[in-house]
Amino acid sequence: MMSFAEVTLSLVACLCAIPVLTLLAEILASLPSLRPGHLAGRRPSVAVLIPAHDEREDLDATMTSVRGQLVDGDRLVVVADNCRDDTALIAEAGGAEVVVRHDPDRRGKGFALDAGLRFLARTGLPEVVVVVDADCRLRPGAIDRLAAASVALGRPVQASYLFTPVLGGSPAHRIGAFAARVRTIARPLGARRLGVPCPIMGSGFALPATCLSKVSFASGHLAEDKKLGLDLALAGFAPHFCPEAEVESPLPLGEAARHRQQTRWEHGHIALIKAYAPRLFREAFRGRDLRLLAVALDLCLPPLVGLALMSGLVLLLTAGWAGLGGAEHPMLVAGGTVGLLCLAIVLAAWRWGQGLVSWRDVLALPSFMLVKLPILVGALTKPQGDWIRTDRVRQRP
């Protein structure tokens, strides 16, 4: 009869294997080359909504990338949210309809989106609303593809979110860019090919008007976009990935800015796991809904560094137990999990890291993991509660 310790270690090893298997399945499905898709369906009426907080340096270029894709009847709306600069004046000069919002007690992108959607509801709601962050650029054809797919499917649609590394960045910067590419392109593409939804990733997503009243947008959550995707999935509107539509944004170059961004992302992600995973699994099993089950499994996949640290720790614990004379099967499961995680990372680097990271950057992994470790520990012991805008250092020509 197995002891309590053996049962516990076996259970922990098996639970740790689930997110690794999820990651491996997504990476394997993402490996085949992407064939260009054809624009199908009619082009609906569109409003592009840009939430902006102190974005005077980036907003004009973002609006330029949007205006060239608008057609007669489309609208461009900028929400100048708690701004201390002339974001509103720049937006107005660029031909946008401007919503000025001042509410320092309710800060965050979710509240800005809510204000913009309320404005659209009062002044004429289009068939599709496309959300673009003020520091992003839409690549040509993105709005047409997002809007047509969203109205055809009756679901939110997420574009490929390209985080572009800055030339001259450190190995840690390049590793962070690779991890972001896996999170925002490889995994969603794999999920689509497996026939399951993707998360909303922050910018470049389209919302059909039919789903806007089903969820609340007013939120100051650190991961407000991912939270919105989970709420929509629970309401029956799980997001769909459209890799042919692309939006790009630079990764922050400075160490302090990158640390703030990673802290916000990962603290927000872990908070969502604790808040949403039980409900997602419950609703998935109750309704026999494979889409919700896939959303729950994807949500429970922690950041790559966190997953590696967790898998390594479980392997050390189970190996220690076996060394003390305990059963070996928990160690074998944990060892297999670490092996599969390494396989997933190698395949992802081969397919998605070309031109971005080199094998020499592997030497920077220990220091990268040491930097990330306090962020992950802090997410469990003292999670960040306030939304903080990430400053980006632009690459100069």
Image (tube, rainbow, N blue to C red):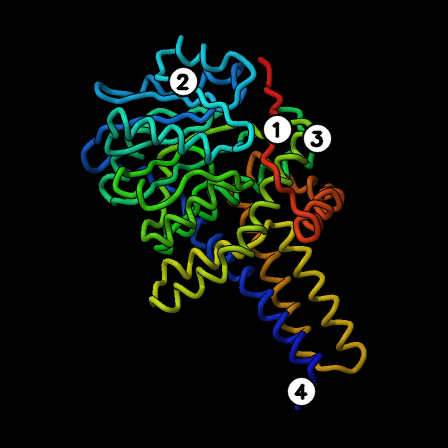
Give above or below for 153 relative to 356. below
Q: Nearer the viewer, mark 3 or mark 1?
A: 3
Marked residue nearer the N-terminal end (2 or 4): 4
Disc 2 to disc 4, how far (Cα)?
64 Å
Q: Residue at x 75, y 46 (%)?
A: 370
Marked residue nearer the N-terminal end (1 or 2): 2
Q: What residue is shown with label 3?
A: 256
Q: Amino acid at mark 1?
A: Pro
Q: Are marks 4 and 1 in contact (CB under 8 Å)?
A: no
Q: Amino acid at mark 2?
A: Met
Q: Residues within 10 Å of mark 2 (few under 14, many from 20)?
A: many
Give above or below for 295 relative to 108. below
Could you tell me which secondary element the residue under label 3 belongs to?
A: helix
User: Residue 345 at what x, y percent from top left?
Assistant: 58, 51
Q: What residue is shown with label 4?
A: 2
Q: Nearer the viewer, mark 1 or mark 2?
A: 2
Is residue 120 shown left or right of residue 391? left
Q: What residue is shown with label 1?
A: 252
Marked residue nearer the N-terminal end (3 or 2): 2
Give above or below for 108 relative to 313. above
Residue situated in front as seen by the camera: 329 or 35: 329
Name the disc covering residue 63, or none. Answer: 2
Is residue 105 shown left or right of residue 358? left
Marked residue nearer the N-terminal end (4 or 1): 4
Could you tell me which secondary element the residue under label 1 belongs to?
A: loop
Q: Residue at x 61, y 35 (%)?
A: 261
User: Residue 367 at what x, y percent from top left?
Assistant: 76, 43
Q: Are marks 3 and 1 in contact (CB under 8 Å)?
A: no
The image quarter containing residue 385 is top right
Residue situated in front as seen by the camera: 295 or 122: 122
